[in-house]
Amino acid sequence: MGERNDDLAYQTLDKIREDPDSWDQLFYFCGSTACYAGWALYLDAANHGRKLNPMEIADPAVDAAELLGWSNSDAATVFQSATGDFAELERLVKNVLNGEVQECDRRVPNGTGWLHFNR
């Protein structure tokens, strides 16, 4: 787990709030839409002057969790949610940021199957 990056977490929420049509929690990357993890990856790349190529990312959930500095349970709480309701997404992210997620072993869907966090 990397250093906590709450700025990126809030920047990702802001992006989705400002452009809800660009958000689809079911897919990491799909055309011009992305889930929370996908947008975190895109925004981090842009923040560092890079252009993200989604085809070069082997494990979006793992990479996004690392960039956000989230534990396995934190990432699963947000990334595994299939919500289409922004208020619910925001609540989940804030639970993570406020330390209100209990640690447990969870699995996260990754576009091609299930990614098991076990770091």
Image (cartoon, grey):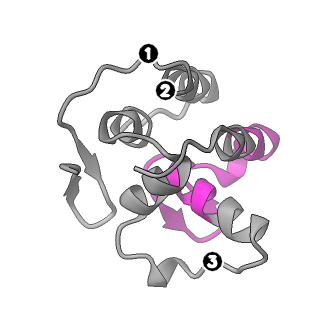
Q: Nearer the viewer, residue 110 or 99?
A: 99
Secondary element at tag 2:
helix
Q: Earlier in the sequence, mark 2 or mark 3?
A: 3
Secondary element at tag 1:
loop
Secondary element at tag 3:
loop
On residue 96, which mark appears?
Answer: 2
How many neighbours does mark 1 have within 10 angstroms: few (below 14), some (14-19), or many (20 or more)? Answer: few
Relative image position of residue 22 (x, y in whole percent): 68, 54
What residue would you read off at disc 3?
52
- Range drawn in magenta: 13-41
Q: Residue at x 74, y 44 (%)?
A: 11
Q: Nearer the viewer, residue 82 or 10?
A: 10
Q: Earlier in the sequence, mark 1 or mark 3?
A: 3
How many numbered marks, from 0 up? 3
Instruction: Report the amino acid beneath label 2.
Output: Val
Relative image position of residue 102 (x, y in whole percent): 30, 19
Q: Are marks 2 and 3 in contact (CB under 8 Å)?
A: no
Report if residue 35 is visible in the image: no
Q: CA distance from mark 2 to mark 1?
A: 6 Å
Q: CA distance from mark 1 to mark 3?
A: 31 Å
Q: Are marks 2 and 1 in contact (CB under 8 Å)?
A: yes
Report if residue 43 is visible in the image: yes
Q: CA distance from mark 2 to mark 3?
A: 25 Å
What residue would you read off at disc 1?
100
Residue 60 to residue 81: above or below: below
Instruction: Report the amino acid beneath label 1.
Output: Glu
Q: Residue at x 60, y 54 (%)?
A: 40
